[in-house]
Amino acid sequence: MTTCIQRPKLSDFGFTTDDSSVFYRPQWSKLPLLVLAIYRVVVSLYVIGFFIGVLVLSIKSQGGASFVYLTTIAFMIFIAYNVTASVNVIWDGCIKRRNAGEELCVRHKTHWFLFSMTTNLNFLVTLVYWSALYTPMLPLIYDLTMHTLTSVVCLLDIFLTPVPIYLLHFVYPLLLGTIYLVFTLIFWAVGGFHRQPIYPFLDYTDHPGRAAGAIVGIFAAVVLMQGAVWALYKFKQWIWVRCDGGTSAPTRLRTLSAAEVEEHCIEDEKVVDEPITTGQI
């Protein structure tokens, strides 16, 4: 078995794969499906309950002001991702027990889209918040859940599940970032927060040049973050091929999906022609 890095292609902008099982099975053969399902449900229930509590308190104290912050928007996307992932693993993996070759459903593509969005956005939120925005004014449980747990779960999901990650999917968080930045300009123009900046680095009144530089930096950070996420995905695959992918040859050949075959550039002639003497590919 060999691995290689393929060049991005136009089809990578989309959400197509011939293996729907990547959305409801674990990456690793030793991780039981039931454990993955329980993990999904527990995380979903916690973040939904936590967000409802935060929302109630926030509306009482600030009205709807909390919705202008990117953290809140990113957390809502994170919730939507976890709920969709929970539905897929329970319905497809535990109830229907779908076969790997079955066609993708809308919820599978939704899962993939939300995964691409939440990994990029929440890694950036965590990085920016703890490096530039943190103040010890908020409760620790709030900071840990809104600005840390999201990234921890995203990192776990990159390594625990086989959902593909494409470099060209940076366009989706970039689009959301563009929409959000346009919103901040409109919010400032209409006098929101009495023209006080939502974030210090987006001060369009007193420091427009710094704000313009921050916008350029945000765009660059989104692209670079997608590269970092993609690199983690490739690193996970490298580990999988050498560890979990190197177990009993007949078992691996039966469970290896077509998407993974293409991704790892398996040389078919070697699999067919070379004798297996050690029980490994």
Image (cartoon, rainbow, N blue to C red):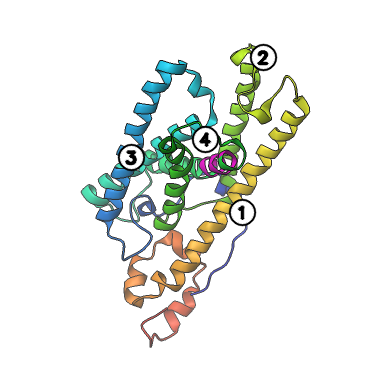
Whichever of labels 4 and 1 marks the residue nearer the N terminus, that label is: 1
Percent from the top left, x then y, of residue 228? 59, 53
Give the Cα separation between the discs numbered 2 and 3. Answer: 37 Å
Residues tagged 3 and 1 counted as in contact (Cβ below 8 A): no
Percent from the top left, x then y, of residue 142? 43, 35
Q: Which-is-in-front pick, marks 1 and 2?
A: 2
Task: From the image, tell me which residue sits under label 4.
Answer: 136
Percent from the top left, x then y, of residue 38? 27, 49
Residues tagged 2 and 4 counted as in contact (Cβ below 8 A): no
Give the Cα separation between the discs numbered 1 and 2. Answer: 40 Å
Q: Nearer the viewer, residue 46 or 268?
A: 46
Badge 1: residue crowd in 10 Å (few <14, some 14–19, many ≥20): few
Which quadrant: the C terminus? bottom left
Q: Which residues are magenta?
A: 121-129
Q: Residue 44 — which label?
A: 3
Secondary element under disc 4, as helix, strand or loop, is loop
Whichever of labels 3 and 1 marks the residue nearer the N terminus, that label is: 1
Whichever of labels 2 and 3 marks the residue nearer the N terminus, that label is: 3
The residue at 59%/61% (across/down) is 6
**On the rendered structure, is 113 left or right of 43?**
right
Q: Which-is-in-front pick, marks 2 and 4?
A: 4
**On the rendered structure, is 203 left or right of 167?**
right
Give the Cα separation between the discs numbered 2 and 4. Answer: 30 Å
Whichever of labels 2 and 4 marks the residue nearer the N terminus, that label is: 4
Q: Residue 189 — which label?
A: 2
User: In the image, is residue 265 above or below residue 271?
Assistant: above
